[in-house]
Image (cartoon, rainbow, N blue to C red):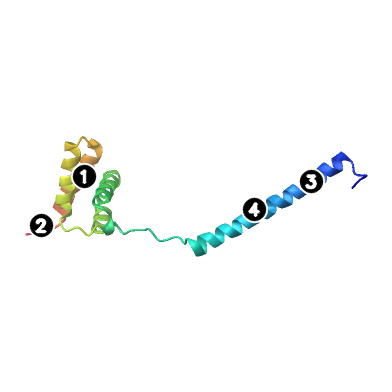
Amino acid sequence: MAGATRGELMEARQKQTHWYLLTGLLLGLAIGLVFSILVMPVENADALPGELSPQAKDDYRAMIALAYASNQDLERALSRLELLEEPNTVDLLTAQAQNMLASGGSETVSRALAELATYLSQYLPSTP
């Protein structure tokens, strides 16, 4: 390469750089796949609504009440609430609405919870 010009040397160096980049990318991808599949595989973190924490259940009930306030689909709201596997849903909705108002929470969510509790109390058979 004694007779090579400076431009030819730069061009040869640039071609090498691209190969190193491609090699590094492929090597990183292979190492990442091996690590993610063999060393630290992903664990399923999905939970059913009945397995949620009490705070998450409150959030879930609030979302159901807001959805009901939006679409007025009582059957759908009831089927979603049944996933929580709680015995006295109407009482829980009413208590949550009252607690939300008492703690200065959202009035919109509190009204939605109370409205859903009212309609469910009329729809569900009363328990002794």
Q: Is residue 118 above or below residue 36?
A: above
Q: Nearer the viewer, mark 2 or mark 4?
A: 4
Measured Cα–Cα span from mark 4 to mark 1: 53 Å
Q: Nearer the viewer, mark 1 or mark 3?
A: 3
Give residue 74's position: percent from left, percent from top. 24, 52
Measured Cα–Cα span from mark 3 to mark 2: 82 Å
Decide which of 124, 35 is in the foreground and name it. 35
Q: Which mark is residue 113?
A: 1
Mark 1 burial class by Cα count in 10 Å: few <14, some 14-19, many 20+: many
- What residue is disc 2 on? 126
Disc on the earlier residue, 2 or 4: 4
Quarter of the rendering containing residue 128? bottom left
| Image point (58%, 59%), residue name | 31
- Cβ–Cβ under 8 Å for marks 2 and 4: no
Identify the amino acid type marked 2.
Answer: Ser
Identify the amino acid type marked 3.
Answer: Arg
Please, which residue is most extreme toward the left here?
128
**What SS does tag 1 mark?**
helix
- What residue is disc 4 on? 25
Disc on the earlier residue, 4 or 1: 4
Mark 3 burial class by Cα count in 10 Å: few <14, some 14-19, many 20+: few
Identify the amino acid type marked 1.
Answer: Leu
Decide which of 52, 64 is in the foreground and name it. 52
**What SS does tag 3 mark?**
helix
- Cβ–Cβ under 8 Å for marks 1 and 3: no
| Image point (17%, 50%), residue name | 92
| Image point (36%, 58%), residue name | 46
Disc on the earlier residue, 4 or 3: 3
- Cβ–Cβ under 8 Å for marks 4 and 3: no
Give residue 125's position: percent from left, percent from top. 12, 58
**What SS does tag 2 mark?**
loop
